[in-house]
Image: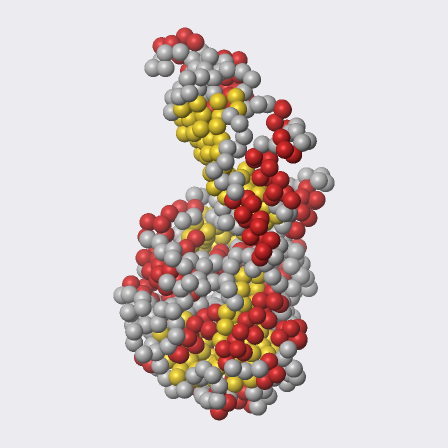
Amino acid sequence: MTPEEKKVFMDKIHAFVGMEMAPPTKGPDDVNKAMIRHWCEVMGDANPVYTDEAFAKASSKGSIIAPPAMLQAWSLEGYPMHSPSKDEALLDNQRKLHKVFDDHGYTGVLGTNCTQEYFRDLKPGDQVIAHTVIDSISEEKATQRGIGHFIETVTRFTDQNGEKVGEMRFRVLKFIPNESNKVESAKDEGKPEVPTRIASPRGHDNAWWWQQVDKGVVPIQRCKNCQTLRHPPRSMCGECQSIEWDFIESKLEGEVFSFVELHYPKFPGYQYPLICAVISLGEGTRIVSNIVGCKPEDVKIGMKVKGKVEQVDEKTMLPQFYPA
Amino acid sequence: MAANFKDKAAIVGIANTDFSKNSGRSETQLAAECVAAALRDAGLKPSDVDGMTTFTMDTNDEIEVARAVGIGDLSFYSRVPHGGGAGTGLIHQAVMAIASGAAEVVVCYRALNGRSGHRFSSGVSGAITTADALHWGWYTPYGLLTPASWVAMYTQRYMHITGATKDSLFEVAWTTRNHAATNPAAFFYGKTFDRAEYDAQKKIVDPLSLYDCCQESDGGSCVILTTPERARDLKQPGVLVKGVGQAAAANMESMTSFYRPEIAAIPSMDLAAQQAYAQSGLTPDDIDAAIIYDAFSSIVHWQLESWGFCKKGEAHDFIMDGSLRLDGRLPFNTHGGQLSEAYIHGVNGIVEATKLVRGTSVNQPKKTVNHALVTSGVGVPTGGAILGKM
Ligand SMILES: [Zn+2]
C-alpha cells in the first residue's frame, strides 16, 4: 500500500470502532442440565455442584449451577455461524470488518487472547444474550505470523431480565501471512513430523566427533605430536601446528563453569525447562551441553556433574549431564 | 607501535532514516536514503564520494547503493565482518583509506529490515549454509540458538565472579529508556518504565529478561568521512577521529568464546581500547561521554571495564553511582541506545557520538563534550573509536 492507500485503509477500519459487532445473539437453548453435563464430561470437570442435584442443594449454591466458563456457550448460534449470507449488505459488522482486512491482504486470522468476568451464577432456566461491541483496533504490529492489527471486542452478557451476568474481552489478530509461514503450512499438509533438535551440520573437521557420539562416546581431540587436547575440534594444533591427531574418550566428569536457563523463544523439538551449560571436564577441556535430572533453580556454578550420551529425540544423540 | 590514525580523517556528514518495526521499503532504499541524507548534511554531492564501506552482513552491495544515490567512480570499497562488531570497523576502514590516499570521501552505511525482514532473535538454524555453520553446530543441538542465550552465558559467570546484580542491569536499561523518552526519533519516545515494570517482564534467557535485550528495528544509518583539510570547507563542523581500534583476541569464536581461561570479560575490547588510547594519546579521563554498544544491558559492564572507566569487576558500582546518567561522570547512549532508540547495528550510535561532539544531541549533556567514545558489538571481534572536536 502507498501511504495514501494506507491512510484510506486505516480510516476504513477505524470507522468500525465503537460499532455493535452484530445484533445481540442468543443460543437456541436456555441454560440446561443436559448441556452442562456434556460440557463437564468433555472438560473432565468433576465438581458435583454442576451435576449432582443433592450435593448442589446442600452446598452454598442451593441448586445446580452452570460452570462459569460456559458463559459464552449459552449465546452461541451454533452451525448457522459458519454459513454467512452471500449478500454483502446482510453481513454483520464483524464480517464486514474482516472483509476490509481480507481485501487488503490481511487474510490471516488468529484468536490471541480472551478474558472473562462473571457477575452471578447461571442456573438452569436462565437465558444469556450476548451484546458485542468492536472496542479497539491496534496500530500496525509486526508479529511472528506477519504484519497485522489486533481487533479487540467487548461482549456484555445479559439475562432474561436485562441484568448483566458477565463480560468478555476477546482479541484477534488479522494479519498478512509471512512468506516463511506459508512455506511451513504447505509443509504441514504432508505427513505430520515430530520436530527434533537442530542437528549440527557434519563437515570434514567435525563429522568424526558426531559419529562417535552416535556410538555413545564423547571424544576429545588430541594432538598426536604434542598430546595437547582440544575442543571443539579443529584441523591443526595451535601449540605445535601438527595436523596429526587422534582422540581420547572423555570420562564426562566435570563441573559447571557457567549456565543459562532458556525461556524465550521456545523452539520446537526442545524440551523445556532447558538448561545449557559450559562444563569444565576433568580432562581439562570445556564442552557446552545440557544439565538435566534436576530443577533449574538447583543448578549452580561450580556444581559437580557427570555426563552420558543419550538419545534425546527420534534423530539426535547428545551428551547430557546430571548432578554428580 | 600505535597505528598512525590520529586526526587523519573527520566525520563530516551523518544521517539516520526513520526507525520502525516495518519500514515498508527495501533495505537498498533505506541504504540509499540514509546515504543521500548524510551527503546533504555534509553539503557534499554524490559525485564527491569515492569510497564506500559497510558490514559483510549488509545485503546492500556498495555498487547498488552507489548507483541508486548517483555516486560515480569508486576507488575504495570494503566490508567488515562479524555482525555488530563491524560498527566502528567502518570508521577504521574509512580512516585507513583516507590516510593512505586510497579515497578522499568515504561513505559508511548500514541498512536493514531487522524487524520486518530477517530477525536475529529467530536464531541460527541447521538450514544455514554459511562457513561458520559447523561452529554453530556445537551449540544448536543443546538449545543455545539466540544472541541472548550466548550473552547470558557470559553474564551468569560475570555476576557470579563479581557479585554484580540485576540492579545495575536495570540501571543501564532504565537510563537508555529515559534518554529515548526525550528523543522523538526513538522507538520508545515518551515511554519510560520503573523497576516494577522491568521486573515484571518475561524472562528471555535467565539472567536476561525482556528489557535487558535490544529491539529489532528497520532503518538505516550513515556517516561520511573525509580529510580534515576538506572538512574545513564543508557545512558542518568536522568531528575528528582521534583513535580507532579493531581487535579479535586470541581463542575467539563468534559469540561463543567459552574456552578462554575466564569468560567474565571481553579481551577483544581490551585490545581495541588499548589501540585507540595509544593512537590518540588520550586516557579514560579525557572521555566526556560514550555511546556503548548495548545489544544487551550486561555487555555495557564489560566495556566500561575494557575502556578503563572503572577497574575490572567494578562496573556494577560505577553504574550504580549514576555515572551513565546525563549529569553523571559518563553520560551514555544519549539517543536511547539500541535498547531504546533502534537497533541499527550500532551505526546509529556513531551518528549519535558525532552529534555529541558537535553539541547537537537531543539529550546534549550540560558539560562540554570534547571527546566521545563509540563502541562496536561484543562477543564477536570488535572495536571502538574516540571522536573529538576539530
Ligand atoms: Zn600439538
Task: Name the residue nearer the viewer: A72 or A60.
Answer: A72
Kindly indicate the quadrant of the structure image that contains residue A236. Answer: bottom right
| Residue B76 percent coordinates (x, y) | 62, 83
Q: Is residue A294 above or below residue B1?
A: above
The answer to which of B162 and B104 lies nearer the viewer is B104
Q: Residue at x 49, y 52 (%)?
A: A276
The picture quadrant where one finds residue B181 is bottom left
Residue at 36% from the left image edge and 15% from the top image edge? A61
Q: Residue furthest left?
A: B321
**Is A148 in front, or is A280?**
A148
Q: Is residue A292 above or below residue B35?
A: above
Judge by depth and name the residue closer to the eye, A323 or A73: A73
| Image: B91 above or below A159 | below
Q: Is residue B223 visible?
A: no
Q: What's the residue at 58%, 53% (across, down)? A: A6
Residue lying at the far right in this picture: please name it: A190
The relative height of residue B147 versus residue B47 in the rendered view (above or below) is above
Quadrant in which the C terminus of chain B is drawn = bottom left
Side (left or right) of A80 relative to A159: right
Q: Position of residue A2 (x, y in %)?
A: 61, 57
Residue A33 on image: x %, y %: 50, 13
The residue sitting at 58% across, 56% down in the picture is A4
Q: Is residue A33 visible?
A: yes
